[in-house]
Image (spheres, helix red, strand yellow):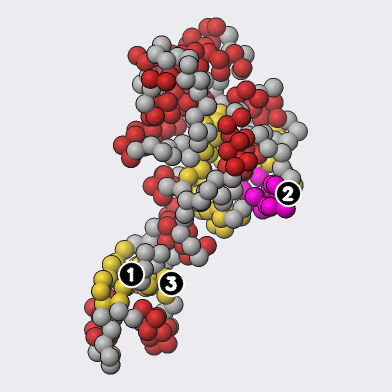
Amino acid sequence: MPLVEVDSLVRKFGTFTAVDGVSFHVDEGELFGFLGPNGAGKTTTINMLCTLLKPTAGRATLAGFDVARDRSRVRDHIGLIFQDTTLDERLTGRQNLRFHAMLYDLTRDQFKTRSAEMLEMVELADKADEVVKTYSGGMKRRLEIARGLLHRPRVLFLDEPTIGLDPQTRRHIWDYLHRLREKERITLFLTTHYMGEAEACDRIAIIDQGRIVALDSPAALKKRVGGDLVTLRTSDDARVETLLLERDGLATRPDPEGGLIVEIDQGDRFIPRIIGDLASLEPAVEVRSVTLGRPTLEDVFLKLTGHAIRDEAADPKADMRRRHGFHARKR
């Protein structure tokens, strides 16, 4: 049963349309991902679902409550982890949790029990009474996860939760999240531009320029690319492109790092044949490198959008809203 339902959601900033008619649903207990570059509309969509922004048009509900009309009820059911930390670094870890508990009207006994559970789960029990400014980046992220779960939300929103963390810390954070999902039976809604994180999702919505261009499981999305992927770098890529199209009916696409990508079944048989064919041309075309691989989500994104996922400057308005802080605005 859908826990989050989104229908034709739109958000404009003046004449700029940041989110352009997106529709999707998230089932209870699902790990759902938004995959796309910075500036694609991921954070803006999250902000609308978390009641930080009012939609310009369209409708969205969470746990049956309208995100525009029932903001307080929606907030009772969600936790949110921002891209940038919103912890008070002058307080201890436990004091940060206590402040959050006060906002959600947890009793003293509820806070004592729940905070102990969460601190133990994220392995910060022995650091709970230390000032947060002494924490590492990974420790701060783990504390934010504990804080976001303190009031037992039904959906935990994670907006680029591992951005800026080193690969080892990123893996540790995901260990905690998978453990959390098993223990808490919670729905996770993730935004990311990391392919490895997207691969872990049950379903992914690929979003670009404010629109959802595809939505399915990672395996199903990769099937859309089809066959093997052969990447050729030659002394005359334009000539090879024309040859493959006119002689074999094979369309190619440019590789962002240079060369041509060919989608074809039995790529291992295609490679020696094309090398021989190019060598026999007059004048011959030199094959400088060739690689064979299976489709990835990067390949899916490239095929659907015509460009690779890229890091773009974040919307300054979104940054301002994020820094303003969700926790201080609950009412």
At label 1, the amino acid type is: Thr
What residue sits 24% from the left and 85% below the top?
279
The numbered mark at residue 231 is 1
What residue is pinned by disc 3? 253
Quadrant location of the C terminus in the rendered image: top right
Q: Residue 59: where, in percent of width, then height?
A: 72, 43
| Direction from residue 180 to residue 232 in the image, left or right | left
Q: Reply above or below: 206 against 305.
A: above
Can residue 174 be seen?
yes
Instruction: Report helix, strand or loop for mark 3.
Output: strand
Give me the C-alpha separation between circle 3 and circle 2. 36 Å
Label pair 2/1, CB-CB below 8 angstroms: no
Q: Give the prevailing secondary structure in the magenta stretch.
A: strand
Q: Do we see residue 179 in this rendering?
A: no
Q: Which one is in front in this view, the residue at disc 3 or the one at disc 2?
A: 2
| Mark 3 Cα shell of 10 Å, populated few (<14), some (14-19), many (≥20) | some
How far is mark 3 from mark 1, CA to CA?
10 Å
Please name the residue shown 48% across and 14% down the image.
Answer: 91
Q: Quadrant of residue 234?
A: bottom left
Q: Is residue 13 magenta?
A: yes
Of residues 38 and 105, the one nearer the viewer is 38
In the rendered image, the vertical position of residue 194 relative to residue 229, given as above or below: above
Q: Is residue 160 left or right of residue 322?
A: left
The residue stretch that appears in magenta: 6-24
The three-letter code of the residue at mark 3 reads: Arg
Tell me the mark number nearer the camera, choosing from 2 and 1: 2
Residue pictured at 36% horizontal, 21% vertical:
123
Name the one closer to the observer, 235 or 309.
Answer: 235
In the depicted structure, whether residue 275 falls above or below residue 43 = below
Q: Which mark is residue 14?
A: 2
Q: Are marks 3 and 2 in contact (CB under 8 Å)?
A: no
